[in-house]
Amino acid sequence: MKYVIGIILVFMAFGCMSTPKNLGVKSGKLSPLKSSPNGVSSQTDQVKKQVKPLVLDIPVSDAKQIIKDACNDYGRHEIMKESEDYLYTVFITGIMRYRDDVEFYFDAENKVIHYRSQSRIGYSDMGLNRKRYNALAEFYYKNKQ
């Protein structure tokens, strides 16, 4: 039994470490969410996983800095990739140290910031990705004046 648990833990650890290959913006869209309920997105058609895009009514550079500040305020994250209209960061959960991939697409043409957050492994996230979105969105709106 200990052997099986050890194998499961090793599998989970490697699953947490490997970066998904499908991330990024393609034709103005972030990647679709997996079928499991452990993610949220402003670009999904899955009603239970939808969040609103953030309003982008300030310069993209200012909005991106506020989002970075929001991520720093939330804690336990590392920025993995950044471009003019995109920010990708990985948040690490407290106890189990799971990795959640969080993306922001700064769509200046439509004046919104699209958001996608998905846990790398597991089925349920106990609502953590939605709670994180709410915290980051609240920080953004309080600080964007």
Image (tube, rainbow, N blue to C red):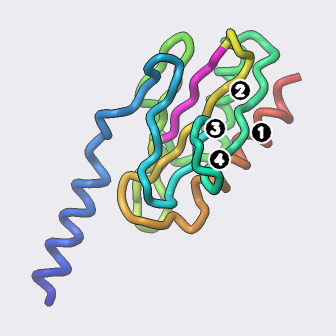
Q: Circle 2 sits on which residue?
A: 66
Residue span colored magenta: 102-107
Callout 3: SS: loop
Is there a contact, CB below 8 Å, between mark 4 and mark 2?
Answer: no
Is there a contact, CB below 8 Å, between mark 1 and mark 3?
Answer: no
Q: Circle 1 sits on which residue?
A: 139
- Displayed quadrant of residue 71: top right
Callout 1: SS: helix
The answer to if 77 sits in the magenta stretch is no
Foreground: disc 4 or disc 1 = 4
Q: How far apart are marks 2 and 1 (CA)?
A: 8 Å
First in residue order: circle 4 vs circle 2: 4
Q: Circle 3 sits on which residue?
A: 42
Vertical comparison of 16 with 139: above or below: below
Q: What quarter of the picture does the C terminus occupy? A: top right
Along the line of sight, the residue nearer the viewer: 126 or 69: 126
The answer to if 106 sits in the magenta stretch is yes
Where is residue 66 shown, x and y percent of the image?
Answer: 71, 26
Q: Distance between the residues labelled 3 and 2?
A: 19 Å
Q: Distance between the residues labelled 4 and 3?
A: 6 Å
User: Dominant secondary structure of the magenta stretch?
Assistant: strand
- Displayed quadrant of residue 55: top right
Callout 2: SS: helix
Give the residue type at disc 4.
Gln
Give the residue type at disc 1.
Phe
Is there a contact, CB below 8 Å, between mark 3 and mark 2?
Answer: no
Give the residue type at disc 3.
Ser
